[in-house]
Image (cartoon, rainbow, N blue to C red):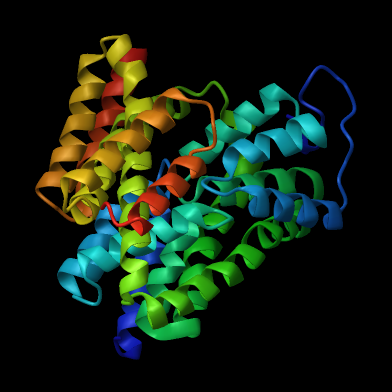
Amino acid sequence: MSDQSGIGDFALHVALLSLIAVGGVNTIVPELHRQVVEVQGALTSQQFADLFAIGQAAPGPNVLFVTLIGWQLAGATGALLTAAALCIPTCTVAYFVTRVWDRFKHAPWRVATEVGVVPVTIGFVAASALLIAQAADGSVTAFAITAGTAAFSYFSKFNPVWALAVAAALGFAGVV
Amino acid sequence: MSSMPESLPAGGGLAHPVPSLAELLLGFLSVALSGFGGVMPFARREFVERRRWLDEREFAEALALCQFLPGPNIVNMSVIVGSRFRGVAGAMAAATGLVVVPLFIMMACGALYARYGDLEVLRGPLAGLAAGAAGLLVAMAAKMVMPLVRERKASPLLFALAGFVAVGLLRLPLYWVVLVLAPLSIGWAWWKLR
């Protein structure tokens, strides 16, 4: 548990990061991890991976896992503050951009920006994958679960939550 | 230039049903609650196939905009769809429907984790879940990178690799990496498009 300034710092980071999280919030997982685990030392890497996983498994937007970190830092207030920091700035930007977006449909800068952000996003998502895998895969079986879930999600059209359910069941059975 | 291009049906001239505020809220709520393991596929089914608020092309365009906008894609989708039909109030209704109930569920999870996360009986399932969640991220990165690999786009692949090394291996602060890498990558795309 951290003091109130801890949650204030964290909420501010979430607000700023959400504004540079082009391509979705999975791109900012490494920076959240860096802040919370490596700089603030408020959570262990394993706790971080746990919370990320709960966010993937729970109903609703996966991004809300960030509010779980807020909860760990400062309880219900922390979670609500984090949710507000996560949603309000980006919703405001989205609202104003969507009103003018069609006007620039064929503008070269728009096309270049759309094309240009994709590779950067991919690199960050891959970094997120590495980070969560490093935190979660302490054993050969855990690594096998990661590989199996990745293959299932990549190759099949089924909802990946089934793979998560199997992963949790294997963990419960004690094989991880 | 029309002052309200967003209120016109952009599809083949077919009139879409125009959802009320309550329908926007409930539509996004139902999507949020059915969306175990990611919401976007459910959003497509609900809004394109079931409720017919958008056609396929409009949904694809909205999705492209979501991916371009900073922040959570699905939250941006709620703002885009809500404001398209009902302005500011519509955006708020849709975003509220999407976020509030899942937020309370997540807070309950947070409370349980804070209290019981250390229990031995939960270690196994959580460890399995975390290993699985890592796999989902691996698959997501693979799905995104494969089109570039197939088309042998060397420079974008280099930018992706640079982002991965800087953030994943060197653990550099994301802000600086974005500030350096995004202009380079966008500038490169601009130069190729000319």
B112 up-or-down from B44: above or below: below
Across and down, in percent, residue B99 comes to 62, 61
- Give residue A102's quadrant in the image: top right
Task: Tell which residue pokes out farthest to the bottom in this image.
Answer: A3
Q: Which of A153 and A82 is in front in this view?
A: A153
Image quarter where the N terminus of chain B lies is top right
B109 up-or-down from B160: above or below: below
B15 up-or-down from B123: above or below: above
Q: Is residue A113 visible?
A: no
- Give residue A35's quadrant in the image: bottom left
- Give residue B80's quadrant in the image: top right
Q: Which residue is drawn at 48% across and 63% down?
A: A86
Q: How many marks?
A: 0
Side of A84 where B135 appears, left or right: left
A97 up-or-down from A147: above or below: below
Task: Tell which residue pokes out farthest to the top in this image.
Answer: B151
Q: Which residue is drawn at 64% across and 67% down?
A: B100
Q: Nearer the viewer, residue B115 or B4?
A: B115
Task: Tell which residue pokes out farthest to the front in this image.
Answer: A173
Q: Nearer the viewer, residue A12 or A176?
A: A176
Across and down, in percent, residue B189 comes to 32, 22
Across and down, in percent, residue B121 comes to 36, 70
Side of B97 where B16 appears, left or right: right
Q: Residue at x 30, y 73 (%)?
A: B120
Q: Nearer the viewer, residue A49 or A121?
A: A49
Q: Is residue A130 visible?
A: yes
Image quarter where the C terminus of chain B lies is top left
Q: Residue at x 23, y 23 (%)?
A: B157
